[in-house]
Amino acid sequence: MSARIWCINLGLVCGFSILISLGFGSTNIGFGDALAGLFGKSSESINTIIHSVRLPRALIAACVGAGLGASGAALQGFTRNPLAAPGLLGFSACAALGAVLALYFNVSQLIMPAAITFTFAGAIAMTVFARRKPGATSLVLAGIGIGALATAITGLVMNLAPNPWALSELVYWLMGSLKNADLSDVMVAVPLTFIGLILLCLSGPALRVLGLGEDTAHSLGISVSKTQLLIVTGCALCIGSGVAVAGAIGFVGLFVPHILRFIVGPDEAWLIPLSALGGATFLVIIDMVIRLTAGPGTPLYLGIVTSLIGVPFFLWLAWRQA
């Protein structure tokens, strides 16, 4: 099956998953009623539940998953390392630091701007450190260092939390969740993620050539520095907006691109959009499963579930690479 057909099929599965997820929550709604509520043709209570709670949550899940999947595919293609992911290169850690600072100073309305600002600050720092020798190795080393620094500062902020309730708020937020997603989050996160996805997709043809090696790419007229800038900026937009609305969600950008690489091959020009659709579908389905299995007294956090799924895959992948 060609990559184009896979792209169409994944798009249909993603759309169908979003529609199905509208019926599940603390109160299950039949598919027909949920579909009618989507068009405002059901009862007032169902219309409100669909438009104010479940549709924003499903759209944010798809948005965050798409950003994580595409970012992981682009970073793996640029570094030529299947273990590369947004968390490894520090994007998630920088975004989390900005959001944690906003929560620490009790300005929750600034979570989104702070997360995106700190992600871009980390991206700029990575670019500056890697500018002497643009390429995969320099970017990875700079990203690991900046991510470690952001993680350490986040830990310091949590250590200085004024009381246990403030600390618990920070800890729970870092676990990742979509329970507070609303339309205002959708209006901000979706456009930013869409711009980021466009930038990442634009880097696809260059990544296809970079797979032959940086020297070969230079000889064919590919600018490594421009490709690096596209990827860093695209990842900053996708990861910053995603972390701001959903907290820290890990490993999606690691295993979704790798699984799709097994299926469609290592062509990044197709792998990036496919990973975006795959990541969106995966996160919508996982969030739907969480809503079905988590009771009122036992909430499950999305970041914890994705890590439980992703860590064994990461260990297997590391063992296989070794």
Image (spheres, rainbow, N blue to C red):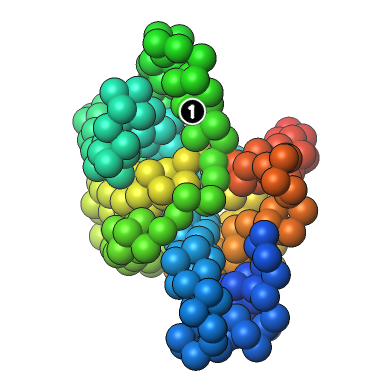
Question: For mark 1, does the 10 Å Cα neighbourhood hold few (<14), some (14 to 19), or many (20 or more) residues?
Answer: some
Which residue does the image show at 74% across and 59% down from the upper left?
A: 292
Residue 126 in the image: above or below residue 258: above
Quadrant of the rendering where the N terminus is positioned: bottom right
* Quarter holding residue 262: bottom right
Q: Which amino acid does label 1 sit on?
A: Glu
Quadrant of the rendering where the C terminus is positioned: top right
Q: Residue 47: x, y in percent? A: 49, 78
Question: Circle 1 sits in a helix, a strand or a loop, which is it?
Answer: helix
Q: Residue 197: x, y in percent? A: 37, 63
Q: Name the residue under label 1.
A: 169
Residue nearer the viewer, 270 or 71: 71
Residue nearer the viewer, 8 or 47: 47
Residue 160 in the image: above or below residue 102: above
Residue nearer the viewer, 292 or 303: 292
Residue 32 in the image: above or below residue 247: below
Q: Is residue 98 left or right of residue 73?
A: left
Which residue does the image show at 73% across and 49% down from the upper left?
A: 294
Q: Residue 158: x, y in percent? A: 44, 16
Q: Is residue 301 left or right of residue 73?
A: right
Which residue does the image show at 47% across and 72% down from the upper left?
A: 48
* Quarter holding residue 154: top left
Residue nearer the viewer, 237 or 317: 237
Let me know if residue 287 appears in the view. yes
